[in-house]
Image: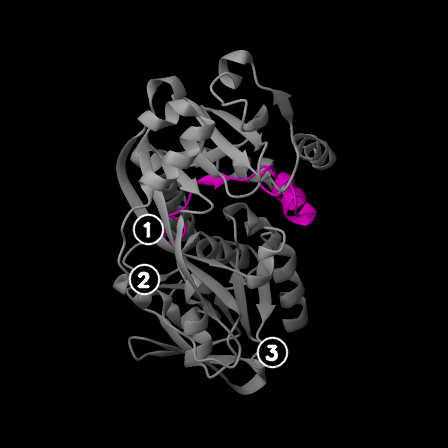
Amino acid sequence: MSERDVNVVIAGGGFFGCTIAMMLHRRGLRPLVVEAEDELLTRASRVNQARVHGGYHYPRSLMTAYRSRHNYERFRSVYREAIVDKFTKIYGVGRLFSKVTANQFEVFMKRIGAPLKEAPERISKLFNPTLTEAVWIAEECAFDCSLLRDRCRRDLDEAGIPIRFGTRVEAAEKAADDNVVVRLSDGSELPAMLVINATYSGLNLLTGGSHLPVIPLKHELAEMALIKLPEELDGLSVTMMCGPFFSFMPYPSRNLTTLSHVRYTPHLQWFEKPGEAPCDPYQRFSQLKKQSHFEYMVSDASRYIPALRNAEHCDSIWEVKTLLPQTEVDDGRPILFRRDPLLPALIHVMGGKIDNIFDVEDELDAILALKA
């Protein structure tokens, strides 16, 4: 397919942008993917905890937990070649400062159908019983971002979907027949029936360039510490719930483990609010000083798992993490799928978790039905 045939422009070549392109292709549309970097899946799709959520992470948001559980097996099946599951996933609940009790957590997981079984002594004895109320083995996996990128690129190539690298969608303007004219950073313009804004942290770069209202967003400078686990913890992944706690997960593309902490992974935060001029979060990210909080993370986490004190800090990966401000109430991660109120042919999409992707399909079908 040549670019002359394009009728949908997708801003953003992350996992969401690439997968939405395939969804539209299967529905008979002709998308173009426009990516500012020189490769696919280079930003938020790569710099994260590589977790495929099974619902366990959200005991205070029934809808997020239920949708995660619903999508879990489908994601594992569709992207099997990128799935890493040769580790034991442990969830624990802290005795102090937790927003859920062990009993509440267990009842909630039964409610959404998320498997839990009591951890054996060889695992439970790794935890400080004074601070840990209960420990379970859960069913959760990780993904290898490098393999996921290869899969996305192969899918786009086989479908004949063109990609423009090193280019940004700067603006969309209303044209005749409810269509839009899309202006790109290389100076070119394209007509389209739809524009999908899947730029994650950069959503408001497009709204600003198009003179449209800002989407309320919360941005964080986020650090994932990359560590090598001590021998006692090899093959394990742990998430302590539910409050100012920590998690470590395999990071397969580097053959290391990420360590994150609710208190210390975010270094600072800022907001984009209606009525204010949009900011460039990536420009701000590039200007911010990045000094690791690993010592704070591991110091607190090792109070719960003493062996973690011997973890080796190998590196840190940094990115802008973006959230919908209303999710701070219950830690929910609903997908943002919003037709722009002033330009309905522009669709803003942002998923807080990679497995949110399947929630897009019904929304796309509803939009396409209106365009038919």
User: Which span is picked out in magenta?
Assistant: 41-70
Q: Amino acid at mark 2?
A: Phe
Classify 337 as above or below 346: above
Q: Secondary structure at mark 3?
A: loop
Are dots 2 and 1 in contact, CB under 8 Å?
Answer: yes
| Mark 1 neighbour density, 10 Å: few (under 14) some (14–19) many (20 or more) | some
* Image disc number at residue 285: 2
What type of secondary structure mainly makes up the magenta span?
loop
| Mark 2 neighbour density, 10 Å: few (under 14) some (14–19) many (20 or more) | some
Q: Secondary structure at mark 2?
A: helix
Please provide percent x and percent y for residue 32.
42, 64
Are dots 2 and 3 in contact, CB under 8 Å?
Answer: no
Q: Secondary structure at mark 1?
A: strand
Q: CA distance from mark 3 to mark 1?
A: 33 Å
* Image disc number at residue 295: none
* Image disc number at residue 318: 1
Quarter of the figure that contains the C terminus: bottom right
* Extreme residue toward the top, this view: 121
Q: Is residue 227 left or right of residue 235?
A: left
Q: Nearer the viewer, residue 106 or 54?
A: 106
Please provide percent x and percent y for residue 90.
52, 27
Is residue 63 rendered magenta in the image?
Answer: yes
Number of numbered discs overlaid on the protein picture? 3
Q: Is residue 85 left or right of residue 282?
A: right
The residue under label 3 is 341
Classify 131 as above or below 276: above
Quarter of the figure that contains the N terminus: bottom left
Please provide percent x and percent y for residue 181.
45, 81
Classify 302 as above or below 318: above
Q: Residue at x 47, y 19 (%)?
A: 126
